[in-house]
Image (spheres, grey):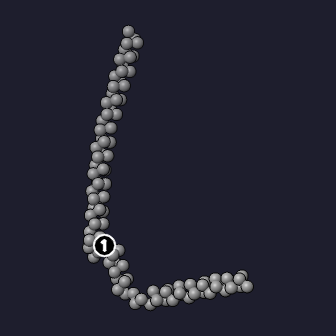
């Protein structure tokens, strides 16, 4: 009979442990559901902001800064870059032509 009592106490302890785990698992599930809802709300908010920015650039801070930069740009830097690129390209063409002429002779 001692073994039966031991088995009964072990069984009761095991059942109590399982019930405790069920309660903890239930709490964990509810926390995960709440976390999932929060993440979904944040993602929806980001999606709507992105869509708003595409259709109305004035809403988007980056688009406003880019627009201000374009308005304030006098075009001088672009011209300078174009001139430098042209000089480098002409130099490369000249070197290529000279190399071909020297090898050909």
Query: Which quadrant of the structure image shows residue 55?
Result: bottom left
Residue 19's place in the image compared with 96, above or below, is above
Tell me if 18 is positioned left or right of 87 in this view. Answer: left
* Image quarter (top left, top right, bottom left or bottom right) of the N terminus: top left
Residue 94's place in the image compared with 36, above or below, is below
Tell me the residue that label 1 is attached to: 60
Residue 28's place in the image compared with 99, above or below, is above
Q: Where is residue 97? Give x, y as percent.
A: 64, 85
Q: Nearer the viewer, residue 93 or 81?
A: 93
Q: Nearer the viewer, residue 32 or 12?
A: 32
Residue 49's place in the image compared with 27, above or below, is below
Tell me if 79 is positioned left or right of 26 in this view. Answer: right
Q: Secondary structure at mark 1?
A: loop
* Image quarter (top left, top right, bottom left or bottom right) of the C terminus: bottom right
Residue at screen point 67% across, 82% down? 100
Residue at screen point 30% across, 72% down? 60
Q: Where is residue 12? Give x, y as percent.
A: 34, 22
């Amino acid at each position: 009979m001692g073994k039966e009592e031991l088995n009964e106490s072990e069984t009761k302890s095991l059942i109590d442990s399982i019930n405790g785990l069920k309660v903890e698992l239930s709490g964990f599930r509810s926390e995960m559901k709440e976390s999932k809802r929060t993440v979904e709300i944040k993602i929806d908010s980001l999606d709507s902001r992105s869509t708003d920015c595409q259709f109305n650039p004035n809403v988007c801070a980056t688009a406003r800064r880019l627009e201000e930069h374009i308005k304030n740009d006098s075009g001088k830097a672009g011209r300078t870059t174009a001139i430098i690129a042209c000089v480098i390209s002409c130099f490369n063409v000249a070197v290529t032509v000279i190399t071909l002429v020297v090898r050909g002779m």
